[in-house]
Image (cartoon, helix red, strand yellow):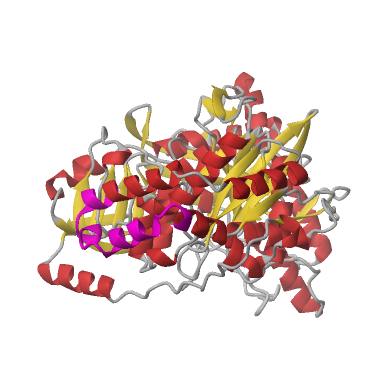
Amino acid sequence: MQHFKLFVLLLLFCISHAQAGRMNPALMVEDMAVNKVAPPAGIMCRDCAEPKLANKPLPASSSRVWQPEVHDLATWQQLSKPMRDTEYSKFVIDLKTNKIYFVDSNVFTLHADFVVDYLQKIPRSRANMLAYNRNYSTQKPQYILGYLTHYPKLNLNNITQDLWTYSFWEGDTITAKDISRAHKRLQQTFTVAPLVFRPDSSAQEQEAKQLKPFKIATINNNQIYQALPYQAFNTGSAIGRLVIVSPSSKIENLSFNEYDIVLLQSSYPDISPVAGVITTQFSTPLSHVNLRASAWGIPNATIKNAVQEFKKLDGKQVAYEVTEAGYTMREATADEVAQHQKAKLEKAKVVMPEADLSAAALLSLKEISAKDANKYGAKTSNLGEMVRAKLPMNVQDGFGVPLNIPDGFGIPFSYYVVHIKNNQLEAIIQAMLANPKFMQDASWRKASLEALRLSITKAPIAPETLKKIAAQWQRQLGGKGVFVRSSTNAEDLKGFNGAGLYDTVPNVKDEKALEAAIKQVWASVWNLRAVEERAHFGIPHDQVYPAVLIQTAVNAAAAGVLLTADIWGHQPTTYTMNAKWGLGMRVVEGQKVAEQILFDFSNDGTRVISRSDESTMLVASPQGGMVEKPVPKGEAILTEKRAKVLGVLAKRVTKIFNQVDVLDIEWVLETKDGKDVFWLVQARPYVVKK
């Protein structure tokens, strides 16, 4: 979505509440270079290595770099900058003179470039930049700084139409009065098309509610997101057979091979490995299908009219490419098909670390560290590392935000091995894997795996083993409701993260349910999607072992996923946050659009991409398991305050796992007596580089 890329990297960070000023780190670095002063600790900037000095040449004065009015498309084209499927430019209103400047965005990257360097012609000293940045505050000393965006051919209310919007930086605390003033001035000077106000933050959404008396039309980012005809989730190219899947197809009936390019008309929680993905419905970028495509390194996009556009290619070998700017699909040549399949066969295999099957202790998280992944699995060992890094429990940092992790203990791989041997299932597994049909016949493979999972779950856990686990549950966790979670040695590996392959059983309340849940988690190592995913990456199935994490259940008001990266605009100081009401399963299922937020930790800016469109949520039942109930009406899940808290927590976790480029962090929000409590329940590499 291009309007999420309109704001240039490193806009501003908060200097202090007293000053109410916001400073651009990049501008500060330029000033530091001139005065030979080191930048303050914690400032992230793109140009630190070779700062651009404040005395850089200014553009020559001419009518090309700004216009006082825009009345035709030719003038707009001169001033605007195309990016993906939109065009954007900037405007500046001088509150002292009421003069408006439509700025050439091909010349001036930042508003500051135009205002400070061109209009004011003053040095970028700290004092001058503090004064400039107060124009993003509620009381603006001189300027309103805004953006104009043109979205061609949006499908709004089932009508294809162009949309023209004006907006302000998400950290701008502009008031309804100043929005109205900007709107009136734009109406007088911009006549190419009617302009609609687009709020970019929760605070601006609240101000937009005050605009009704001014009769100012507004549109939110969620509406635009839903109306966009195209969204690239993972760029790249592929050759394969196009398979258009009927919208009525059930997930249990889907069967693909890794040379298929699939066109999905319904949302699915997961699919087997394929060569490319096209969807006709938008979902969160953090759904399992989208995460799969990212891990597989395949092209993946939402193209709303894909069925009509590509139906003549159904069943044919096609060349499919996704870029930020658009997509292409055409019939592939025989040579292209042969070369692509050869490259697939020569792909690198994932190296499996050797599992330690000798560990037998039921250890609490505080006794487990990252080095224990070969005994307790990656999920458990990563959480243990986080607990150990924050001891004593719930220690607070300078922000007063505790790093909460639900208490739990790990059941090592060896318990699964004993269960398989005690119930004579080892020979069945070996025979299944050795049968040529396992690789050649998808239906036989699916039926064999179903039978194996049933055998694992029907076989009883040894009484002394179950008694030992139940005793640990009572002793350490007080017998409270727990989540029984998978934690295998076949996830979070170099080149393979395995997200969502294995089962989690929520809100287990009694010993009988605990036994059933443990066996379900063990059996899930033989889920069809897990087996096909591992086969895609060359992971030997007979070397995969499931551990189990027994973890105290949290009464979730909301839950979601945070990436320590900007999945939309690729800005290095921005995190991507997804959220839904209730338990977090539905965020990764991708069945509905999640609430999506971008949080810039350099300036505490919170930008709204979409709000959750679900009408119900999953919550824990007092009797065990989950129940469905209506979601709170009209409430944002991630307010600016909550987004900041999550950002602080994520920064702390990045310091624990400082060797990982991008982290995928799962969180749960609990509300106690009207107060928010955030719990972190997983941290893993988002995309592990080969």
Q: Name the foreground residue: 360 vs 318.
A: 360
Residue 499 versus residue 234: which sits nearer the camera?
499
Relative image position of residue 481 (x, y in whole percent): 67, 35
In the image, residue 435 lies in the stretch drawn in magenta: yes
Where in the figure is residue 148, as x and y percent of width and height? 52, 45
Q: What residue occupies the far top of the structure in this picture?
A: 213
Q: Residue at x 23, y 42 (%)?
A: 245
User: Relative to the observer, which residue lies in front, 25 or 572?
Assistant: 572
Residue 433 among those drawn in magenta:
yes
The one nearer the camera, 576 or 45, is 576
Visible residue check, residue 104 = no
Q: Is residue 4 above or below residue 417?
A: above
Q: How many marks?
A: 0
User: In the rendered structure, which segment of residues is drawn in magenta?
Assistant: 421-446
Q: Residue at x 61, y 41 (%)?
A: 483
Q: Main secondary structure of the magenta part?
A: helix
Measured along the vertical axis of the image, is residue 456 above or below residue 508?
A: below
Q: Position of residue 378 (x, y in %)?
A: 58, 61
**Left or right for 81, reference 206:** left
Q: Is residue 154 visible?
A: yes
The residue located at (67%, 69%) in the rendering is 658
Q: Is residue 352 left or right of residue 139?
A: left
Q: Which quadrant of the view contains residue 212?
A: top right
Question: x%, y% of residue 525?
Answer: 44, 54
